[in-house]
Image (cartoon, grey):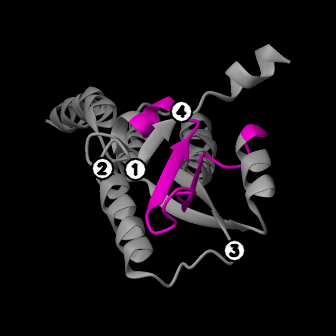
């Protein structure tokens, strides 16, 4: 009769592994990975491998989840460069930033605004890959904003939701090859 619990708990391993792979939200994946590690530690303990169970619980679950969480948190951000004194109090700018946030939230991304003193520093930061994109007033009319991104995937995410005149893709490798 005790064997049925062993079979049920052991059957949870492939089930939780499949759920881990099928998750879209990376934070849900981390939670299910923690459950997977706890189930594995329980199975090891039930088979009499207490040392392996302890190692799985400490390293395989706790440490891995912590490190994955830090990695996911830092990699799920779009760094958008803006010019410091460029009228960011305008409603149009605030609306554009709100649009970016709502578009990026669908993909569990955050938006981080990074300010620069002038257009030269902003362009240099984009070319040096310090930021993922720039947002600044158009030179011709000075009333609307234009966004440039160096990440093709971010361009593919944002472009269908915004007017194509508001965003363009910039490949920094194209400028390096020419010099």
Locate residue 86 relative to residue 90 in the image: left or right: right
Identify the residue at image location x=49%, y=61%.
111
Q: Check residue 49 in the rendering and tell me which mark sits there, or answer none.
A: 4
Q: Where is residue 178 drawn, in percent x and y?
A: 79, 15
Of all residues, the one furthest to the front in this rendering is 140
Query: Pointer 1: residues within 10 angstroms few (<14), some, or many (20+)?
Result: some
Q: Which residues are magenta?
A: 127-155
Q: Earlier in the sequence, mark 4 or mark 2?
A: 4
Q: Which one is closest to the eye, mark 1 or mark 4?
A: 1
Residue 27 % position (x, y): 40, 53
Label 4: which secondary element: loop
Q: In whole angstroms, how far apart are the C-alphas of marks 2 and 1?
A: 7 Å
Upstream in the sequence, badge 3 or badge 2? 3
Label number found at residue 84 = 3
In the image, what residue occupies the spot 68% across and 20% down? 174
Check contact, mark 2 vs mark 1: CB within 8 A: yes
Cα distance in 3D space between marks 4 and 2 = 56 Å
Q: Earlier in the sequence, mark 4 or mark 3?
A: 4
Q: What residue lies at 28% left-to-right and 52% top-to-bottom? A: 106
Q: CA–CA distance between discs 1 and 3?
A: 20 Å
Q: Quadrant of the N terminus?
A: top left
The residue carrying pointer 4 sits among few (fewer than 14), some (14 to 19) or many (20 or more) residues within 10 Å by Cα, namely few
The disc at residue 162 is 2
């Amino acid at each position: 009769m005790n064997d049925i619990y062993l079979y049920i708990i052991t059957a949870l391993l492939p089930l939780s592994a499949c759920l881990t792979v099928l998750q879209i939200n990376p934070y849900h994946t981390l939670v299910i990975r923690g459950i997977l590690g706890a189930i594995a530690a329980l199975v090891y303990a039930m088979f009499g491998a207490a040392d392996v169970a302890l190692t799985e619980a400490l390293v395989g679950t706790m440490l891995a989840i912590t490190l994955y969480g830090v990695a996911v948190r830092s990699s799920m951000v779009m760094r958008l460069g803006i010019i410091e004194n460029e009228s960011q109090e305008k409603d149009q700018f605030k609306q554009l930033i709100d649009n970016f946030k709502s578009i990026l939230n669908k993909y569990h991304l955050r938006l981080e605004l990074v300010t620069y003193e002038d257009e030269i520093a902003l362009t240099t930061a984009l070319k040096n890959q310090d930021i993922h994109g720039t947002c600044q007033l158009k030179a011709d009319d000075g009333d609307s904003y234009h966004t440039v991104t160096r990440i093709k995937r971010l361009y593919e995410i944002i472009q269908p939701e915004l007017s194509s005149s508001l965003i363009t893709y910039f490949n920094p490798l194209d400028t390096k090859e020419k010099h």
